[in-house]
Amino acid sequence: MELIVGAVILLAGILIGRFLPGLGRPRQSALAEVKPLCGCGHASSFHEERGRCHALNEVARWDGGRWAGIESVPCNCRKYTGPEPLPAFYAPELTE
């Protein structure tokens, strides 16, 4: 009998923990939007067909150990590593 009571308490705890926390916040989609970002953090539009990145990164500039500002330097990425964009096809209209 004690084993059944323990199982019921365990099941009640699992059900409360599973369904109660989700009531106060909106559910997030399981299929979150995939952003086409490379490992360098730039979008696929910044990469040429061979893969080289043409974006600029902002880095801190130091002068003798003292901060001297921010400068823009070219991205060192040499190949796009993000998700492959879908190919674009042109489909002419069908005429009868």
Image (tube, grey):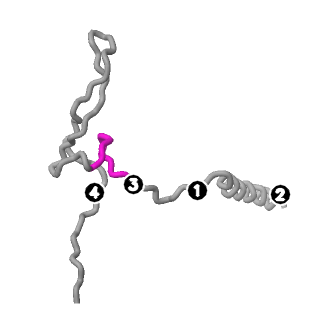
Residue that badge 4 annotates: 84
Q: Amino acid at mark 4?
A: Glu
Residue that badge 3 annotates: 34
Against 45, residue 58 (above or below) is: above
Label 1, label 3: how far apart the Cα atoms are: 17 Å
Farthest-out residue, top: 64
Instruction: Tell me the mark number nearer the camera, choosing from 1 and 2.
Output: 1
Other-residue count near label 2 (Cα within 10 Å), few / some / many at <14 / 14–19 / ≥20: few
- Which disc is residue 2 wearing? 2
Farthest-out residue, left: 50
Q: Quadrant of the N terminus?
A: bottom right
Farthest-out residue, bottom: 96
Nearer-N-terminus badge (2/4): 2
Nearer-N-terminus badge (4/3): 3
Of 46 and 32, which appears nearest the observer? 46
Q: Position of residue 62 (x, y in %)?
A: 29, 16
Residue bounds of the magenta highlight = 35-44
Residue name at image x 21 percent, y 42 percent: 53
Nearer-N-terminus badge (4/1): 1
